[in-house]
Amino acid sequence: MPDGREPAGRVAREIVLPASPEAVWESLTTPDQLSSWLGSRVELDARRGGLLRLEGGGAVRFGVVEALEPFEYLAFRWRPMVGSPDGPLLGPGTRVEFFLKPKEGGTHLQVVETMMPTASHTSAMASAGASR
Amino acid sequence: MNGQSMNDVFFALADPTRREVIRRLSEGGPVTVSDLARQLPVTRQAVAKHLTTLAEAGLISAEREGRRTRYHLTPGPLAQAMGWMAEVGAEWDDRLLALHRHLRRGS
């Protein structure tokens, strides 16, 4: 990060998958496939700003697609709300990013989940940066 | 811990100076603003501001002792933040394994 801050609430995992980046991309962006491997009922409008709705374990959770670069990169803001996109927050808001790279007949997939600063933190950071 | 307070903890920990304060408190026990200002390459004012942020996140607490205020670590929120990371990591381990199985079946 430009000012030496690093996101503290950050979790990263990676795996090599036995499928092409195109096939992995399909698994990450097609509602039927998502539902199949996530084991939840998933609805997804796979375009920037599109809504992700995940129903399972007695809760409905929502995400918004933030960026997508077919076969390479997918990011969404995860708002773990209950009931509706305006419902009460279940936990902290996060950003989930997927990085896909071809690797020896398969795909290297990295997933990074980062806790998102709230609006008050964003302005606090901006003012801290300005006063430095 | 709710989403907001967890966010406060991670925001507090996102700054290298504040992490250094936490590290010193975890090693040396209670300190004052003056102690920290002597040890760190920042002003006393900046130290005071960082301590306020850490205290608001619940990571440290203040103890008045006559005219001095000493700060010490309150380990609960830090442990909860680490717990969040472990939990999210374990969820992704499970999901990626499921994705791996899904793709193996499909090929």
Image: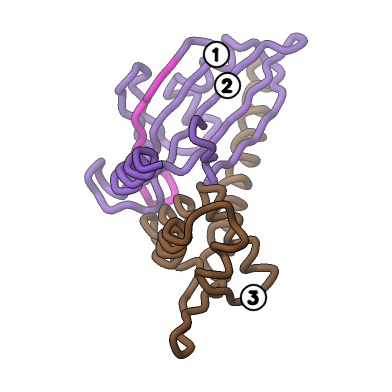
Q: Secondary structure at mark 1?
A: loop
Residue type (three-letter) at the residue carrying disc 2: Phe
Q: What amino acid type is highlighted by mark number 3?
A: Gly
What's drawn in magenta, residue-wise? Answer: A56-68
- Of A130 and B53, the residue lying toward us: A130
Residues flagged by tags 1 and 3 on a common chain: no
What residue is shown with label 2?
A99
Chain coloured brown: B
Crowd tier of the residue under label 2, counting other residues whose Cα lies within 10 Å: few below 14, some 14–19, many 20 or above: some
* Colour purple belongs to chain: A
* Local secondary structure at mark 2: strand
Residue drawn 56% across and 71% down? B73
Q: Nearer the viewer, residue A114 or A79?
A: A114
Mark identifier at residue B29: 3
Task: State the separation of the CA atoms marked 1 and 3.
Answer: 48 Å
Question: Is there a contact, CB below 8 Å, between mark 2 and mark 1?
Answer: yes
Distance from disc 3 to disc 2, alpha carbons, whole Å, reads: 42 Å
